[in-house]
């Protein structure tokens, strides 16, 4: 079973000017992540505007990304595990998409409780258990009650870990150190805990301190090398000190990247770096005006544009 640790970057979906999925842009963004030490990728999550994609577009992305990774491997280039979200409004649709991903050769899939319907904890357990049992590839859950309306409790995660050997990772996105402690205590490390990098929650340091193995982040889209550095599991004091220092240094940038719902600011920052972020699909509104100028100033002052602008950065695709 794969060992998930370090920086797990939740990627945006780039679009062309005529509003098509930019597959070539996807390849460039993926190659950049691999170059700078990202350990694994998460595609079709909330940062990927997944609710604004058609089913056929999602399938196109899965096929294209897997084919690209196979092509990289055939050329002797480094590859990393890629997980795709199989979240949907119904259990049946989640199962169907997860099985599609497995058939195409995905490394893993991630499930959530369905949004909007506000199901009970028992229903959440049944839903996630059914989804995990429908495939044999590694699975994860994305525990994000602020977007989904339901928290997956530690006892439910424990049950799922005991029932499903392919349940390997829990992405936590809620402001509760107790949740982190309880999941780690009850699961005993069988499920790797990786957390979001939302600065208002500030659970990166607590996650790593209780034995979590990394972060499932969006900051790595802009500062991939730095995110990889502060996302390492805490195995010795030098890593702990480096992680704290790096995280504290880049905390103000994370605050700005989370000014609005993902991926609004992330795409704006990618575009400022000359990378294929592209526009946002409606009903999102593109980042513009004084806010965009302030973002550009922040990226300039922190040295991000100098280091990562595409004109200064050779990326082998």
Image: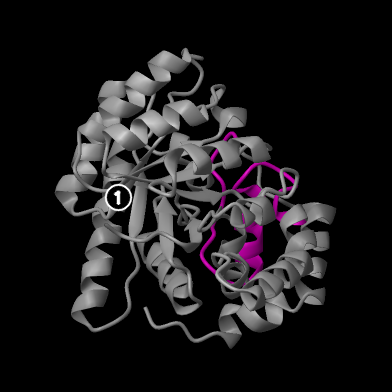
The structure residue drawn at horizontal position 23% and vertical position 45%, both measured from the top left corner, is 101
* Residue 220 vertical placement versus 171 (above, below): below
The structure residue drawn at horizontal position 68% and vertical position 38%, both measured from the top left corner, is 175
Q: Residue 292: x percent and y percent?
A: 77, 57
Q: Residue 212: x percent and y percent?
A: 53, 54
* Front in this rendered view, residue 24 or 1: 1
Q: Residue furthest left?
A: 103
* Front in this rendered view, residue 287 or 313: 313
The structure residue drawn at horizontal position 27% and vertical position 44%, both measured from the top left corner, is 166
Q: Magenta segment, which residues?
A: 256-283
* Residue 109 vertical placement versus 244 (above, below): above
Q: Residue 275: x percent and y percent?
A: 54, 69
In the image, taking residue 55 as reference, residue 269 lies left or right, namely right
* Residue 109 vertical placement versus 237 (above, below): above
Q: Residue 5: x percent and y percent?
A: 46, 62
In the image, taking residue 122 as reference, residue 171 lies left or right, namely right
Residue at image mark 1: 108
Q: Secondary structure at mark 1?
A: strand
- Asked if the magenta segment contains residue 259, the reply would be yes
The structure residue drawn at horizontal position 42% and vertical position 67%, both measured from the top left corner, is 30
- Find residue 294 and report its image quarter: bottom right
Q: Main secondary structure of the magenta part?
A: loop
| Residue 315 shows in this picture | yes
- Asked if the magenta segment contains residue 82, the reply would be no
In the image, taking residue 49 as reference, residue 180 lies left or right, namely right
Q: In the rendered view of the protein, which quadrant contains the N terminus? A: bottom left
In the image, taking residue 233 as reference, residue 83 lies left or right, namely left
Mark 1 surroundings: few (<14), some (14-19) or many (≥20) residues within 10 A: many
State the count of labels: 1
């Amino acid at each position: 079973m794969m060992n998930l640790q370090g920086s797990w970057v939740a990627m945006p979906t780039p679009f062309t000017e005529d509003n098509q999925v930019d597959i070539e842009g996807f390849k460039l963004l993926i190659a950049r992540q691999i170059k700078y030490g990202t350990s694994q990728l998460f595609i079709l999550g909330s940062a990927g505007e997944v609710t604004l994609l058609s089913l056929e577009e999602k399938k196109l992305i899965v096929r294209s990304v897997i084919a690209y990774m196979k092509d990289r491997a055939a050329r002797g280039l480094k590859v990393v595990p890629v997980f795709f979200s199989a979240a949907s409004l119904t259990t049946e649709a989640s199962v169907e998409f997860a099985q599609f991903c497995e058939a195409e050769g995905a490394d893993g899939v991630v499930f959530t409780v369905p949004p909007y319907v506000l199901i009970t904890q028992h229903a959440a357990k049944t839903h996630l258990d059914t989804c995990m049992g429908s495939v044999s590839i590694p699975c994860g859950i994305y525990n994000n009650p602020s977007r989904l309306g339901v928290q997956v409790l530690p006892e439910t995660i424990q049950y799922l870990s005991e029932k499903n050997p392919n349940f390997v990772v829990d992405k936590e996105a809620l402001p509760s150190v107790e949740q982190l402690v309880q999941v780690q205590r009850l699961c005993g490390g069988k499920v790797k805990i990786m957390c979001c990098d939302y600065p208002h929650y500030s659970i990166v340091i607590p996650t790593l301190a209780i034995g979590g193995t990394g972060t499932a982040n969006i900051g790595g889209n802009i500062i991939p090398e730095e995110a990889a550095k502060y996302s390492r599991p805490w195995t010795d004091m030098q890593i702990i000190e480096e992680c704290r220092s790096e995280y504290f240094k880049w905390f103000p940038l994370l605050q700005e990247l989370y000014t609005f719902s993902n991926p609004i600011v992330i795409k704006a920052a990618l575009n400022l770096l000359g990378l294929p972020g592209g526009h946002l699909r409606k009903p999102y509104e593109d980042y513009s005006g004084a806010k965009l100028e302030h973002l550009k100033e922040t990226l300039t002052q922190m040295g991000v544009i100098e280091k990562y602008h595409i004109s200064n950065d050779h990326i082998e695709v």
